[in-house]
Image: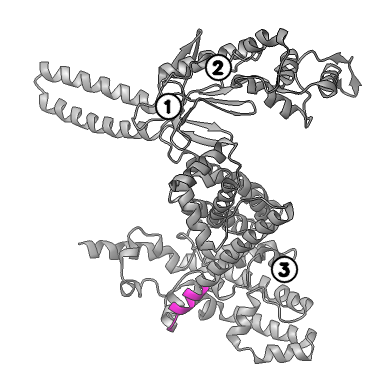
């Protein structure tokens, strides 16, 4: 059971706390200071600038004080404490013995139903305490009833009010039926309810009742054949619903981590859902403030919240799902803002390749961050002292030479990263250097992944045909210039948010009106060979398919705009550049100059580079947007033609 106490700090019984501290060994002046410090606590109300009378607080701890958590831990530890931590006078021993017997001490030690056997420590663990979060563990329902009764007695004697609504059960089992209900001292505790699961169960009960009626009707009526068919259909649906109900097991958050009855992927699925809920926020910030602020919001606010506890998830595809959510968030941040047409960046086109968008931010992708967090958590485990429960478990596993799957995974990650994981002792400076080195390693891995992506693309573009008809984000890969591109573009194109967003979209292959984009949206078009679609997807300029690279480099529709852009760039370099910069510009080929303008590379003085982008790119993006609209009008029949080819091939 996950027990919850109502207003934990405000309910602390002070006389019980003073006796607890005395029995623990806190005596003398320190004991008197704590009493005076708490007994003199008072509070007042304030409304509209007017303060009310001061009222002395008769119970509870001071809110916000650094000493309050320590005092609360000492107080709630009486649930499990076996004996005093210091000698007590003879006249108090009877009362102290009774005082130390109001919690789980009431449960016999040889009760095998209470507690869960820890194979590493070879003893039963009945309870886990973390501040006001109490977890009772039992092997059976009977044992859980015993522990709950003892806990209720402790709360009653120590004047703590149990929050019945928030105190919930969790039945860890491999069976489909994971619901549990326990009644103790007139109070009912049960597993948490899943609204979606309850709806499915209601539908399941309705179908089972329907099947029973069909069976009875089939025995009495003549239309038995029809009823038999309806019964078979309903029974198939019943099996499907039972499988769905089994998948939607009970789940409960504990210390921010979502546990489920099957010890499955409840936390992973929950964090994926939370990340999906952040998409509209990233889009809103991008449109209101700019893509740089949206990317910073993802890095500083969303990432810590979504990655919390993910190092404890055992699923093999956790990294893949985290990377997918991160790509989606960065896409919304980078591709959504600045435009006033009200359309989403993905409307009217197939799915875009998003790997290259990792260059837009300085944050490492979430799958790399997940691996980093697992290595950090492994170091914490290795450095725990044996006097703690987790430290004792790790030490016992190490002595036996048997490690859990999680530790084996983290050890393998540390080896692949080339990181030495030792105890996290030493000075704070040493620990800080280790964390900094690990962070730098994560950044290098992100940079290496990006460089490998561009290198692989270039190696596949051996011929002109592969270069023009390959990846849609080829121009983005061709103009890569490290990471944190959002900040660089904000400096090179200040006040031109629409231009920046359009440039990133077009470089990523977002040409919604092109023949290739329209053709790919037809279901089943991926099964067709390239030669089957050459005529349908050919551009009206007759130079080849209307791919993104075709529109960037060779299409007659954009040729004038490209030539004007390069003439403008040459003019700016000639007028504002010095002799060295003009010489550097002269040795570049036409393609290199074109890619230089589309990238954030700066080989000349910054004001010259900024003038080139400000003078060339806004006009180019306006032309490209007009070309997309023109192509959309021309290519109305492409979808119909591709569908006809698919039907002809099937027939």
The residue drawn where x is 16% and y is 25% is 227
Label 3 secondary element: loop
Extreme-front residue of the structure:
90
**The residue stretch that appears in magenta:** 454-463
x and y percentages locating residue 214 in the rendered image? 19, 21
Foreground: disc 1 or disc 2: 2
Instruction: Please state, as top left, top right, bottom left or bottom right, where the C terminus lies in the image.
Output: bottom left
Classify residue 250 by image quadrant.
top left
Magenta highlight: main SS: helix
Foreground: disc 2 or disc 3: 2
Residue on which the image places disc 1: 171
Label 1 secondary element: loop
x and y percentages locating residue 114 in the rendered image? 45, 21
Q: Is residue 544 left or right of residue 578?
A: left
Residue on which the image places disc 2: 105
Classify residue 10 by image quadrant.
top right
Q: Which mark is residue 493?
A: 3
Residue 621 shown in magenta: no
**Disc 1 and disc 3: Cα gap in Å?**
58 Å
**Disc 2 and disc 3: Cα gap in Å?**
70 Å
Residue 374 seen anywhere in this rendered image of the structure:
yes
């Amino acid at each position: 059971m996950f027990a919850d106490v109502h207003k934990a700090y405000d309910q602390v019984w002070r006389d019980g706390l003073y006796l607890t501290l005395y029995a623990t060994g806190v005596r003398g002046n320190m004991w008197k200071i704590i009493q005076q410090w708490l007994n003199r606590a008072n509070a007042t109300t304030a409304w509209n600038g007017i303060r009310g009378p001061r009222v002395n607080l008769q119970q509870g701890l001071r809110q916000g004080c650094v000493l309050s958590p320590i005092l609360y831990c000492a107080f709630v530890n009486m649930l499990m404490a076996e004996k005093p931590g210091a000698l007590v006078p003879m006249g108090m021993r009877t009362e102290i013995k009774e005082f130390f017997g109001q919690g789980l001490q009431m449960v016999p030690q040889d009760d095998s139903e209470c507690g869960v056997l820890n194979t590493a420590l070879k003893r039963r663990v009945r309870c886990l305490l973390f501040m006001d979060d109490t977890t009772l563990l039992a092997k059976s329902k009977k044992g859980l009833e015993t522990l709950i009764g003892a806990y209720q007695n402790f709360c009653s004697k120590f004047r703590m009010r149990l929050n019945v609504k928030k105190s919930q059960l969790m039945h860890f089992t491999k069976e489909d039926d994971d619901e549990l209900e326990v009644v103790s001292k007139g109070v009912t505790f049960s597993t948490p309810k899943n609204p979606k699961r309850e709806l499915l169960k209601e539908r399941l009960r309705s179908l089972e009742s329907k099947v029973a009626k069909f069976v009875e009707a089939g025995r009495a009526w003549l239309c038995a054949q029809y009823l038999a068919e309806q019964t078979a259909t309903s029974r198939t649906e019943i099996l499907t619903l039972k499988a769905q109900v089994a998948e939607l097991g009970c789940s409960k958050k504990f210390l921010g981590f979502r546990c489920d009855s099957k010890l499955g992927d409840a936390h992973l699925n929950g964090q994926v859902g939370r990340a999906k809920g952040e998409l509209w926020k990233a889009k809103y910030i991008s449109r209101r403030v700019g893509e740089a602020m949206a990317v910073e919001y993802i890095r500083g606010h969303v990432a810590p919240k979504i990655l919390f506890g993910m190092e404890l998830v055992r699923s093999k595809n956790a990294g893949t799902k985290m990377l997918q959510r991160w790509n989606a968030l960065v896409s919304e941040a980078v591709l959504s803002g600045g435009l006033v047409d009200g359309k989403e960046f993905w409307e009217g086109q197939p799915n875009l390749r998003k790997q290259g968008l990792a260059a837009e931010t300085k944050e490492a992708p979430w799958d790399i961050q997940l691996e980093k967090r697992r290595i950090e958590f492994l170091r914490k485990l290795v450095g725990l002292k044996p006097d703690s429960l987790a430290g004792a478990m790790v030490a016992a596993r190490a002595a036996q030479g048997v490690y859990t799957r999680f530790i084996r995974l983290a050890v393998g990650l540390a080896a692949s990263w080339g990181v030495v994981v030792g105890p996290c002792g030493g000075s704070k400076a040493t620990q800080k250097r280790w964390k900094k080195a690990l962070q730098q390693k994560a950044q290098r891995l992100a940079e290496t992944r990006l460089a490998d992506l561009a290198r692989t693309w270039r190696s596949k573009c051996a011929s002109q045909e592969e270069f023009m008809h390959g990846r849609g984000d080829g121009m983005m890969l061709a103009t890569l210039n490290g990471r944190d591109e959002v900040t660089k573009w904000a400096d090179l194109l200040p006040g031109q948010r629409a231009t920046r967003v359009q440039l990133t979209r077009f470089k990523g292959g977002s040409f919604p009106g092109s023949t290739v984009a329209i053709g790919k949206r037809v279901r089943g078009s991926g099964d067709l060979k390239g030669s089957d679609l050459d005529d349908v997807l050919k551009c009206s300029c007759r130079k080849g398919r209307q791919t993104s690279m075709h529109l960037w480099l060779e299409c007659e529709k954009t040729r004038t705009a490209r030539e004007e852009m390069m003439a403008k760039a040459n003019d700016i370099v000639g007028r504002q550049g010095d002799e060295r910069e003009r010489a550097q510009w002269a040795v570049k080929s036409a393609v290199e100059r074109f890619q230089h303008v589309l990238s954030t590379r700066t080989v000349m003085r910054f004001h010259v580079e900024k003038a080139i982008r400000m003078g060339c790119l806004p006009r180019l993006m306006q032309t490209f947007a007009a070309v997309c609209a023109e192509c959309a009008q021309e290519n109305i029949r492409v979808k119909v033609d591709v569908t006809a080819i698919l039907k002809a091939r099937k027939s």
